[in-house]
Amino acid sequence: MAEYPLDASLTEIASDAAWAVTPHSKPDFFVVDDQLNNDRYIYIEISPQVHVSSEWLCAMATCLLALDGWGIAITNVTNGYVIVLAQVLLLHGPVFDGCKDLEEVAYALRMHLN
């Protein structure tokens, strides 16, 4: 797990250098550890190396069954994002146009991570 300072006074070079102090130079996930607004979402970015599958999406949704009203927002999708809720996936962006099932959604997500 890596930590990234959310300090507006840091220059871009200084904030990028902060990643170097973590023991993991290429983390698989980045989770914002502070609430950005009144939504009950956890915002994450997924490494393109992670194999996104329908099973992986279902596992996240299953974890959310015990957390009423919470969701996981996957934000590093080219021209879109996904919000995983316990009972439904919310898809936004043209990369998901034409997806007819969960397998197609997982494939589109996997192909458009940035």
Image (cartoon, grey):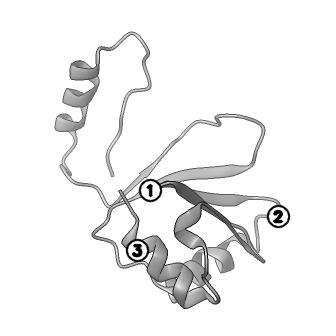
Q: Which amino acid does label 3 sit on?
A: Arg
Using the image, determine if residue 34 lies above or below residue 65.
above
Judged left or right of residue 55, residue 2 is left
Q: Can residue 74 be seen in this view?
A: no
- Which residue: 47% across, 71% down? 109
Residue 78 circle label: 1
Place of residue 73 in the rendered image (x, y in percent of width and height, measured from the top left): 60, 56
- Which residue: 68% across, 51% down? 41
Place of residue 44 in the rendered image (x, y in percent of width and height, measured from the top left): 50, 53
- Which residue: 65% across, 37% down? 35
Residue 51 falls in which quadrant of the image?
Answer: bottom left
Q: Which badge, 1 or 3, comes first in the chain's sequence?
A: 1
Residue 68 circle label: 2
Q: Which badge, 1 or 2, comes first in the chain's sequence?
A: 2
As helix, strand or loop, the secondary structure at mark 3 comes to helix
Residue 47 circle label: none
Q: Which badge, 3 or 2, comes first in the chain's sequence?
A: 2
Q: Decide: marks 3, 2 in contact (CB < 8 A)?
A: no
In this rendering, the count of numbered labels is: 3
